[in-house]
Every structure is written in C-alpha cells, then in structure tokens.
Image (tube, rainbow, N blue to C red):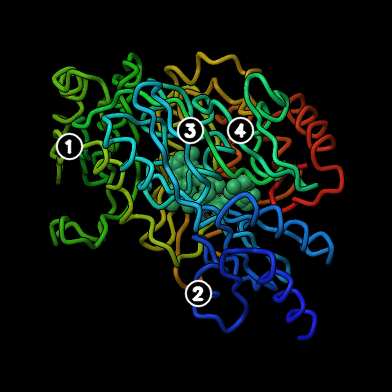
C-alpha cells in the first residue's frame, strides 16, 4: 500500500495528466483493452498529455524497476497494452491531428483512433491507409504495419509514415525518419512497439472520396462455392482501387439485418472502390453481385468516413478474443475447401473466418524497405474467435488452432505481427522471418539495451 502511495505521489508531482489507481472510476475502463481476456491490474495508470509526461513516467517506472506497458487505442490482441503490477502509460489523452492540405501530410498523436483521424483528414478530402474498425488506435496499427482499404492503392499504413517522434528508454526524444535515426525508422514501420514510446506520427495523405463506393453483399452459406468461384475471378485482375474481403459469419442480430436470417451462417463480401470513378467499381463488382440470391446487398455510394466505421458493430469492446492468421497465394479449390470446412466448425455466433485481398501498391514496396516483410501473399486469412463467456475459452481457442493446422499446407511463410494472439519470440521470428528478426534484435539492442519496453511479442 505504501509503495503504491509513494508511486502515486511521485507520478502526481511530475505528470500533468491524471494518475489512476485502484478505486478511481476510470481505472477499470483504462486497465483492460479491447480484448477482455487480459484482466490485469497495473500499479498505476499515467494518462499522458504530452512528451514531458511520457518522459517523467518512464523515469519514475525505471527508478522503481516497474514494468511499463503502453496503451494507445487499446486494441492489442495479445493484451500487450496492459500490465499486472506495472506502470501503464495511457496515451488516450493525446488526441491531436493537424493536417497540412498543401503538403498532403498529417501529424497525429498516439491517442488518436482511426475514426478521429479519418474525420480530420476527410475534412480536406484526404486520407491514408487505416484500420477498418474506427475505434482502433493509429499507434499500434501503424507500428505493426497497417492493413486497410487503401493499401492496394497507397501501400500499408507504415508505408505512409514520413517520421515518428519517439521517447526512448533513457528519456531522450528523437525523430526517426528517412534522414534521422534511419534504423529506428525502419524498425517502427512494421516491427511493432517496444523500441520507445511514439509521441507523434507524420503521415503522407492522398486524395480520397469523400464519396466512394462500398458496402456488403450477404448470401446464405450454402451459396459459398459459387460466391468463392466468382471471388477468384474478381481477384485475378483486381484493379488497385478495389478493396475486397470475404467473411464467413453468422448474420448479426442487428436491426439492419432481416429477422429471418439473423443468426444464420452466411458468406459475406465486404467491398469498396476507392478510385475516382465509382462506375468503374460498379463494373468490377457487377458479376459477383449477381451470383445466386443474395439476402442483402448494400453496395452503393457512401462517404469514406462512414464506410470506415461500418464494421464497428462487429467488434465491440468487452469480448474475449483469440485469432490465428496467415497468407495464401490463391483461392484454389483446396483452399476454398479448407476455408469452408473450418468456417462450418466455428464455435458460438460471433466468431468469423475471413480473408482480405492484399497485393497492389503494398506488394510493390521493396520488402527490405521496412520491417513489415510479408508482401507476397495475395490473401491474408484470419480465424477470429470472439466470445463473452469465459467458459467458452477452451473451445474457441481450440477452433482457431485447428483452423491454423488445417490452413497450414496452403499458408505461406510469414505472418502479420498485429494479428498474432500468442506473444512469444518464436511467433515473431516466424512471422517476420530470420533476417528481419535479426535486424530488429540489433536495433532493439541499440535503442533499448535494458529491455525497458518488453510487453510485445518481440525480441
Ligand atoms: C477490432 C480490431 C480491428 C482491427 N483492425 C485492423 C485493421 O483493419 N488493420 C490492421 O492492420 N490491424 C487491425 N487490427 C490489429 C491492430 O492493428 C493491432 O491490434 C494494434 O496493435 C492496435 O493498435 P492500438 O493502438 O489500438 O493498440 P494498443 O493495444 O494500444 O497497442 C498495441 C501495442 O502497440 C504498442 N504501442 C501502442 N502505442 C504505442 C506508442 N505510442 N508507442 C510505442 N508503442 C506503442 C504497444 O506496445 C502496445 O502494446 C485490429 C484489431 C482489433 C482488435
């Protein structure tokens, strides 16, 4: 108790933001992230308001040899943004976004979510590749790579970062960019967190929308074979402005879904066209939308900012979650068969199997240019389990692991580190490959030799 009091006093005297401890009304909300599986209790939470707060909090944690965790959007799958007994640096209060429309850049603080980022950049008709759920943080997503609807036109999120401001473990503030600390700049683009605390991101922006084409088509799962055959044709020569995702899911119990299909297993196409002429997108999607008898087809003109929040209803805070992931090179008959079988074995009503079309601009970036190294896979697949009841944990985790085993013969080497649910070195080495792993290890040694930041599945 005394130790906590002393820590709290030290933090309150040097950090401008609020300090939360057990018993504070906000403590419970901020200590658990999106994945409710990680119910941890930090000794204190420092709600950082700027660089100086981050520096002060790190110094205090180091003096007391407390583990540090960093939370921005709180969406870490493996619960890396909370800590048991350590100091949690909550970047939530740092929500600034400044757009320079002439230079087409945005400077954003780490507490910004994609919803906020898109809102501010779309005010100028601009955007960069960002996550497909608006509550996800820009910070963790960017540091791991950043898969999103604009990736085939403009590369991954990390391909669009011009510079990072970073507080290092020794408290110094450095810039990492194409000119300064270039090794750190390389690592922060896809290598994950734990090299320091990023306090500012500068992004390159692109003209997008405001109106684009997007929405979903939902068919009863019995029509999956036809839908997937049509999907393979679309994917074969997909133009860069096409964003394309298929999921196997039970139709959610939402007002917008007809009552007679709610809870029924479905195959769903989520597609958008981010290019200028929406009629080109209509054309590319025409044939697949005609397949079988869709239960719903919502594809039409939509503001980009709204499109970016359409999936929010599928991903509320408060569930437990686990996932397995990988890349495949094509939607062959074998892959389709495995996906269909695995999807049919889903447990509960909120888990899903999905694949997302990769390729386009992201695959043209030199794989050595950033720490994000898997740029060949045509499709990224995810078996995502979400469940509210702890009693289901074993069955849900087992389903994801089975899915991984079944997909293994078709899965390419390398995985996306932001989709790793298990947090050990073996997973990260396997995900990024030996060469990238070795380079990341060297950079970690240079910037954080004492392993002050050690919450992520890396190194
Ligand atoms: C519902 C949901 C939807 C998702 N959608 C997508 C998607 O469309 N595309 C995609 O690519 N990924 C997606 N992801 C995965 C997502 O990229 C990662 O979970 C990412 O880590 C989330 O970032 P965050 O800031 O919200 O997370 P946090 O949990 O706050 O942080 C995750 C980790 O990143 C590090 N980190 C966070 N902030 C900082 C900082 N300021 N400085 C240094 N390190 C920091 C920390 O070490 C932390 O442990 C999704 C995840 C969820 C749960």
Q: Residue 26 carries which label?
A: 2
- In depth, the one of 215 and 380 nearer the eye is 215
For disc 1, the marked residue is 302
For disc 3, the marked residue is 380
| Quadrant assignment for the C terminus | top right
Q: Which of marks 4 and 3 is nearer the N terminus?
A: 4
- In depth, the one of 352 and 77 nearer the eye is 77
Q: Earlier in the sequence, mark 4 or mark 2?
A: 2
For disc 4, the marked residue is 190
Q: Earlier in the sequence, mark 3 or mark 1?
A: 1
Q: Give the crowd class for mark 1: few <14, some 14-19, many >=20 residues within 10 Å.
A: some
**Residue 145 image point, x, y percent:** 55, 33
Q: Which of marks 1 and 4 is nearer the N terminus?
A: 4
Q: What element carries label 4?
A: loop
**Residue 236 image point, x, y percent:** 35, 16
The residue under the point 15% across, 56% down is 256
- In depth, the one of 294 and 13 nearer the eye is 13
Q: Is mark 2 on a helix, strand or loop?
A: loop
Vertical position of residue 396 compared to residue 423: above or below: below
**Residue 178 image point, x, y percent:** 63, 20
Q: Give the crowd class for mark 2: few <14, some 14-19, many >=20 residues within 10 Å.
A: some
Distance from the alpha carbon under mark 4 to that under mark 2: 31 Å
Distance from the alpha carbon under mark 1 to that under mark 4: 30 Å
Question: Viewer-nearest of labels 4 and 2?
Answer: 2
Q: Earlier in the sequence, mark 2 or mark 1?
A: 2
Question: Viewer-nearest of labels 4 and 3?
Answer: 4
Distance from the alpha carbon under mark 3 to that under mark 1: 25 Å
């Amino acid at each position: 108790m005394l130790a906590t009091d002393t820590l709290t006093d030290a933090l309150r005297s040097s950090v401008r933001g609020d300090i939360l401890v057990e018993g504070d009304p906000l403590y419970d909300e901020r200590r658990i992230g999106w994945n409710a599986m990680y119910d941890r209790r930090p000794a204190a939470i420092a709600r950082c308001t700027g660089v100086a707060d981050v520096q002060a909090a790190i110094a205090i944690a180091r003096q007391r040899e407390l583990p540090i965790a960093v939370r921005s959007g709180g969406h870490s799958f493996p619960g890396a943004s909370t800590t048991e007994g350590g100091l949690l640096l909550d970047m939530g209060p740092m929500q600034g976004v400044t757009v320079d429309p002439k230079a087409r850049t945005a400077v954003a603080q780490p507490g910004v979510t994609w919803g906020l980022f898109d809102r501010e950049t779309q005010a100028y008709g601009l955007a960069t590749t960002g996550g497909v759920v608006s509550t996800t943080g820009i910070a963790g997503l960017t540091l791991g790579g950043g898969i999103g609807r604009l990736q085939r036109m403009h590369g991954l999120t990390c391909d669009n970062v011009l510079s990072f401001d970073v507080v290092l473990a020794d408290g110094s503030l450095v810039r990492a960019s194409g000119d300064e600390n270039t090794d750190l700049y390389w690592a922060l683009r896809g290598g994950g967190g734990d090299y320091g605390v990023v306090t500012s991101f500068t992004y390159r922006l692109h003209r997008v929308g405001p109106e684009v084409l997007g929405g979903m088509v939902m068919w009863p799962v019995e029509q999956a074979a036809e839908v997937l055959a049509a999907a393979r044709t679309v994917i074969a020569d997909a133009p860069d402005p096409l964003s394309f995702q298929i999921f196997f899911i039970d139709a959610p119990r939402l007002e917008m879904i007809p009552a007679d299909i709610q809870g029924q297993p479905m195959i769903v196409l989520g597609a958008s066209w981010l290019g200028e002429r929406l009629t080109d997108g209509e054309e590319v999607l025409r044939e697949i939308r005609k397949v079988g008898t869709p239960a719903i087809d919502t594809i039409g003109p939509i503001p980009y900012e709204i499109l970016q929040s359409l999936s929010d209803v599928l991903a509320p805070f408060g569930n437990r979650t686990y996932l397995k992931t990988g890349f495949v090179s094509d939607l062959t008959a074998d892959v389709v068969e495995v996906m269909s079988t695995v999807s049919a074995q889903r447990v509960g009503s909120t888990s899903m199997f999905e694949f997302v079309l990769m390729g386009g601009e992201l695959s043209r970036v030199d794989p050595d240019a950033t720490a994000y190294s898997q740029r060949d896979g045509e499709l990224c697949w995810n078996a995502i389990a979400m469940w509210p009841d702890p009693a289901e944990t074993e069955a849900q985790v087992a389903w994801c692991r089975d899915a991984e085993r079944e997909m293994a013969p078709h899965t390419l080497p390398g995985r996306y580190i932001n989709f790793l649910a298990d947090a050990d070195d073996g997973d990260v080495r396997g995900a990024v490959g030996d060469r990238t792993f070795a380079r990341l290890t060297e950079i970690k040694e240079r910037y954080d030799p004492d392993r002050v930041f050690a919450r992520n599945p890396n190194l």
